[in-house]
Image (spheres, coloured by chain):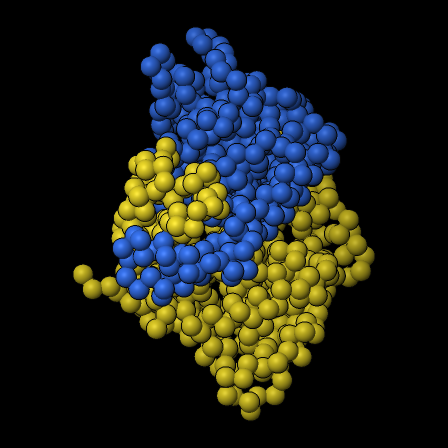
Amino acid sequence: MPERRPPELDIDRLIADRRTRIIVCCGSGGVGKTTAAAAIGLRAAERGRHVVVLTVDPARRLAQSMGLTSLDNTPRLVQEATSAPREPQEGNAADSAGSLHAMMLDMKRTFDEIVEAHADPDRAAQILANPFYQSLSSSFAGTQEYMAMEKLGQLRRADEWDLIVVDTPPSRSALDFLDAPQRLGRFLDGRLLRLLTTPAKVGGRAYLRVLNAGFGVVTGVLTKILGTQVLRDVQTFVTALDTMFGGFRERAEYTYQLLRAPGTAFLVVAVPEDDALREASYFVERLDQERMPLAGLLLNRVQQLPAAHLSAARSLAAAEVLQAAGPDGSAAGPDGSAAGSDGLAASDDRHAASNDEPESAARLLAMAALRLHADRMEQAAAQRRAAEHFTAAHPQVPVAQIPAQAEDIHDLDGLRRLGQAFGTGHRPGATKP
Amino acid sequence: MATRDTDWDGVRLHVVTGKGGTGKTTVAGALALALAADGRKVLLMEVEGRQGIAQLFDVPPLPYAERRIAVGPGTESRPGGEVFALVADPESALIEYLEMFYSLRYAGTALAKIGVMDFATTIAPGLRDVLLTGKAAEAVRRKDSKRGRTYDAVVMDAPPTGRIGRFLNVASEVSELARVGPIRGHADTVQKVIRSPGTVVHFVTTLEEMPVQETLDGIAELRTLGGIRPGAIIVNMTRPVALAPGQLRAAADGELDQAQLALGLKSAGLDDSAGLAAALATELCDQARTALGQEAQQQRLDTADRPCYHLPWINGGMDLAGLYRLASLLREQKAA
């Protein structure tokens, strides 16, 4: 069966297109969203865009490399990125120098600011001090997502940057980030809160008439769960928030429209493994339902091997030839090195360094290389299968591949190399031409 | 009923946390299987509503009810044990709580329909967490007439490392509720279980910077909470290293003897041994760099002074066979 090849996602073209104003990187946890967002931001800045990267939870050293030392909610200029030399081989020297700002989201601060913007000072102070507000603003599942989207809206309105790259929060699943803002909005704007705050009005509304009789039960149960004092606190909080309901709805709606606007591009980030790609699939389908603009799939950590023309089977067979001819003359070791998924585990005493004789040292080194290669080829094949499943289900979704990096990325050079790889990615396991 | 020494004799609640993407659910599942050897009965509990357990064990989505999902590995003398699974959500736990303490099941169910339960579990600080940890504590303490304790062990696939301290530190989290609220008594009971020597928190990580950092931060955080015990560090998805430790530095610096490698390849009968040697040397160099980075991360983990288990990457995706394999590796390393 001929292999199905997805259309190629051209990230350089996406960032070169001045109409692209927002890039949202989303995907399940642990797939490298933050690093990808930072690398895209850096590459765009070095190609003349004025970029701000909104990160949510960067690794410490990566944050430091971008000059981010605290969660301060303020975009910081990344000096080195702006002054860094442009890539000579890219001939678009017409662009003036770009710039890169980066910021880390402080979700509680962002929430506080909304409250302060929508309530008079006294009422704002009352809300901010309420224990229920504090719980909601720091630990409600979804507040982080909501505030990331709120911050995105603010950055867009500020209009100081021509490209905003957003890294979405490390959610349980990729979809949280679309659902949570609505859930929080619905929650804060819900009829239940109104019911709690304005019991007197309940009887007047036909649709709530059923609840009228039950209202005593509601407060009764809540009292049982929470206690009377707590219920009073809740009511105070809700009353104080009441003035802000309209504001919340409006803001959520604004952000939602922003995400659907033509200048927005969603990049779904995944690693070539079944779980991450399953999440990516859900996300692609969901974006489609919401008619939100999907740019494509960024497939991260793809195994690419210089010796891909040597198959896993031949590589293992060659290693066995060497083993059979080895100084100890014995067959495969106790770890069954010829078989199975971790088959390259030659035991330590057979490592190349352990032998002085040049010929057997050569043999042992070659065995190590061949077993490693076979393992990597199998991994590449598994990755290819996972990617093909995705493409079979979503043949129209463009894909860009980022080769697996040998080390964690924690400096601008690493981000720069990753950015360059966006342009050169190809399918897993293939040899570079 | 310990028939062999493990690192966690006497532990009955295993809380498993880890950064997203490190395989927390998989390790929790493998640990449950490992504990279910020798005729024991184990409850594997999920609290984040992702149906990760159902996917892992390849069964249909699980309800808020304890279902048997797997049989533990048996030995010649004793039959394998059983793994039950429970997907706990705060709303159902709250309804159950109301029924148990106030006989309010009907009202609870009706109120859930209009969103009262969602409201209560969302807005009340810590209520959500106390209900979920409460369910685990209840399962740990539950007894039935025939065999004494219902479960020999409970394994909880807990929230990720970033939230684990808050999740388990129920007493202080519900303090706002607990001034007068009736949930106080419940929280105290739960707290006794969480802070007992019978409860430990295991951290799943990979040897990458960010998960390792979160693991160390998480362990440090638990230690400040007083009485919540960090358990093991479980390094997941490891891959064997091809070269001996002494060769890694040279290989990582690109100083591997390519002529020697070519000689070896030639004696294996491979064509173009020089070209192939160059390509394979690049692969060895990449892996050596990765391995050195991982070694540094392992050293950071060692500073936490916790038992450390290693589980391999399973090629070709996780399936039941892979899960049983991880379970037996956990047993070999005395995790269960």
Give the residue furthest to the bottom.
Answer: A94
Q: From the viewer's perspective, is residue B89 above or below residue A386?
A: above
Q: Residue furthest front?
A: A357
The residue located at (56%, 53%) in the rendering is B249
Q: Position of residue A168 (x, y in %)?
A: 55, 59
Task: Determine whether, in the image, residue B17 is placed left or right of residue A362.
Answer: right
Where's residue A229, x and y in %? 73, 35
Which picture quadrant has residue A339? Answer: top left
* Vertical relation: A81 (above or below) B61: below
Q: Nearer the viewer, residue A167 or B241?
A: B241
Q: As drawn, is A342 to the left or to the right of A171?
A: left
Q: Residue A192, percent across and down?
A: 57, 46
Residue B174 horizontal side relative to residue A259, left or right: right
Q: Does residue B273 appear left or right of residue B9 in this picture? A: left
Q: Is residue A372 visible?
A: no
Closer to us: A29 or B142: A29
Quick one: which chain is yellow? Answer: A
Front-lying residue, A181 or B194: B194
Q: Identify the residue at image location x=72%, y=60%.
A: A69
Q: Residue furthest left?
A: A1
Residue sitting nearer the eye, B120 or B239: B239
Q: Give the number of marks.
A: 0
On the question of residue B48 being in view, the answer is: yes
Q: What color is chain B drawn in?
A: blue
Vertical comparison of B102 with B268: above or below: above
Residue extending farthest to the right is A122
Tell me the residue at 43%/60% (across/down).
B258
* Image x and y of residue A400, in percent: 41, 68
- At horizontal 48% and vertical 43% (from top left) the residue drawn is A354
- Residue A413: quadrant of the picture: bottom right
